[in-house]
Image (cartoon, rainbow, N blue to C red):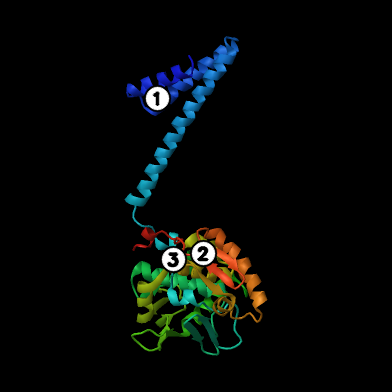
Amino acid sequence: MDNRDIDSWVESMRARGESEENIAIAIKSRENNNIRQMAGNTSTKRTREVNESLQAILKRIEKNRQTRLSTEAKDFIEETLPLEDPFNNLWFLISPLVQAGLPHRKPRSNEFTRVNGRLTLSMMAPQKIGLPSGVPPRLLLMYICTAAKQNNSRELLLGKGIRDILHKLHVPITTGKRGSVKSYTIQLQRLLATHFTIIENIQKSPQRRAAMQIEQAQIVDKARLWWDKEGDSGAFLYLNEQFFNSINESAVPLDTNAIIKLKNSPMELDIYCWLSYRLTRMKKPTIAPWDALMDQLGAHYKERKTFKFNFLQALKSVLEVYPNAKIQEHKRGLLLYPSLPHVAKKLTKQ
């Protein structure tokens, strides 16, 4: 039986309505017979050629089967199953805090300012409490925004302890003076005690004069941050109405896996969040100057050279999780191109 005979034999079985699985069994049986012939030295070379043809057909059948199963599984996941818990695939953060983030390290004073073009974000906290800084408040903000969007409610129950939040944020639970339990508890207190002032300079246009828009914001109107023992409902937040509306109107979707991989660096988190917001809203390429990037993402750096080095190192990690981001280093800054969103639009539907 030559290669054409094999193909004809397989097609005849398909014409009779035999399933691909039954055809594969028949081919395997024919292959075993050929192996026995080879053992008897009967036309060994020819038998090997036939077996190679049989193996090629088997591979095509298996590939088609896997493709069919993969397609069916994909359709089932995307069309049949309901949308998963947002904490499993998407986190959210309001756009003003994406455009101008929190301090990377603890500031010396209780005031801190970041500038992003026409937008200025100023933060102030009680002197005894201090401003939030580092990775913990960034993840906590994402937790609050995601929970509010998921539940569509200003009132958020935080569970029986900070450990419940750490579990949601994929943060290892450690105790002690420098453990995550104490660190995240302190940073949550600082975050909720901080007052935000958002100032946006509106450019001149033929229809109107230059103007300034000022918004005062805070995260909560009320919060309880202690956890009692049995019988207690746990800690809760009652979100500020303006903050809650900002979540529903302008929250930026972020990929959970990307955040988890970048969660050891505030710089990497800030760059990823900013690019997720900025690149998908662009209509043409633009340059983000180094000085502007330093004001926006590295306010604690004194020298641009140091900031640039650390920024580019962090950018490498970000591009590993967001490969669709079209970016090119330029002597004047960072050349940005319109890019595909990192999060599929259909996943953002609530």
**Callout 2: SS:** helix
Q: Is residue 111 above or below residue 297?
A: below
Q: Amino acid at mark 2?
A: Ile
CA–CA distance between discs 3 and 1? Answer: 50 Å
Numbered circle sitting on residue 280: 3
Q: In the image, what residue occupies the spot 59% across and 84% down?
A: 107
Q: In the image, what residue occupies the spot 42% across and 39% down?
A: 67
**Callout 3: SS:** helix
The residue that disc 2 covers is 259
Front residue of 146 and 117: 117
**Callout 1: SS:** helix
Numbered circle sitting on residue 22: 1
Q: Is residue 36 above or below residue 105?
A: above
Q: Earlier in the sequence, mark 2 or mark 3?
A: 2
Residue 24 spot, x, y in % from top left: 44, 25
CA–CA distance between discs 2 and 1? Answer: 47 Å
Q: Amino acid at mark 3?
A: Thr
Is 177 situated left or right of 248 in this image?
A: right
